Image: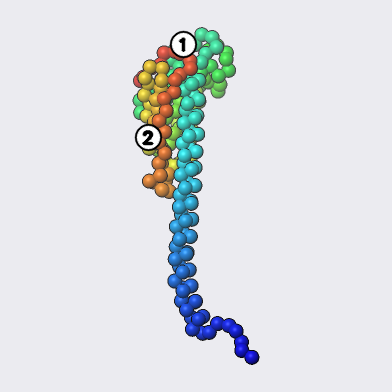
């Protein structure tokens, strides 16, 4: 009776082919995994940048709101990448000044690669500012502001720290909804 199976030479050929194919397949899988991770980081970077942009837009649209008699500018662009806004958050008819816990003054600034915010500030100096981005994963490389009539333009560029070539740039022009005097400078 004849037994069926593979011969030694057939087994050696199959093993030699597998020795060639498996490392190639491993490299392909590794490259696909790295590309997938990079795409996930790109998507997260995009989401983070648009979240920051939305927060800025919301503050700019609110700037100058007053349910009564408020004095001064609701929006001011300070030196060195600084945005200062005021709005009557509790509709008391006046802007609560700093250092009140319920102050209606808000600041946004670029500092050391981070977009920071603080409530109850009249300028962009000082300590106690909160980072709006995750400094362990991203860096804000550009935050510029330009006032053109009733529109405030801002440009925000966010960069991944893991893959510095990954960047997201957002340019927005927001029409202010509350018409007061907007100023540039201190």
Spot occupied by residue 21 in the image (x, y as percentages of width and height): 46, 69
Label 1 – label 2 distance at C-alpha:
32 Å
Q: Nearer the viewer, residue 8 or 109?
A: 8
Question: At 43% across and 36% down in the image, what residue appears?
Answer: 114
> x, y (%) of residue 113?
40, 38
User: Residue 115: which quarter of the image?
Assistant: top left
Q: Which mark is residue 71?
A: 1
Q: Could you tell me residue 178's position as x and y percent?
A: 48, 15
- Residue depicted at x 41% and y 17%: 150
Is residue 78 at least partly visible in the picture? no
- Res 42 seen here: yes
- Mark 1 crowdedness (10 Å alpha carbons): few <14, some 14-19, many ≥20: few
Residue, disc 2: 142
Vertical position of residue 159 compared to residue 17: above or below: above
Are circles 1 and 2 on residues that touch, CB within 8 Å? no
Q: Is residue 159 left or right of residue 69?
A: left
Disc 2, SS: strand
Q: Secondary structure at mark 1?
A: loop
The residue closer to the viewer here, 121 or 151, is 151
Residue placed at 44% from the left, 66% from the top?
A: 24
In this view, the mark in front (1 or 2): 2
**Furthest residue to the top?**
69
Q: Residue 123 shows which numbered tag? A: none
């Amino acid at each position: 009776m004849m037994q069926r199976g593979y011969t030694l030479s057939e087994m050696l050929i199959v093993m030699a082919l597998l020795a060639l194919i498996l490392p190639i397949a491993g490299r392909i899988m590794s490259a696909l995994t790295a590309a997938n991770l990079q795409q996930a980081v790109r998507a997260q970077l995009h989401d983070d940048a648009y979240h920051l942009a939305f927060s800025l837009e919301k503050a700019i649209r609110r700037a100058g709101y007053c349910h009564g008699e408020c004095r001064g500018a609701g929006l001011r662009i300070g030196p060195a990448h600084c945005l200062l806004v005021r709005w009557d958050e509790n509709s008391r008819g006046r802007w609560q000044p700093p250092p009140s816990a319920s102050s209606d003054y808000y600041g946004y600034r670029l500092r050391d690669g981070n977009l920071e915010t603080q409530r109850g500030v009249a300028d962009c100096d000082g300590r106690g500012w909160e980072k709006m981005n995750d400094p362990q994963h991203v860096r804000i490389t550009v935050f510029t502001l330009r006032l053109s009539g009733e529109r405030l333009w801002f440009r925000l560029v966010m960069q991944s720290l893991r893959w510095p070539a990954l960047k997201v740039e957002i340019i927005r022009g927001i029409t202010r909804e509350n018409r007061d005097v907007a100023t540039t400078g201190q």
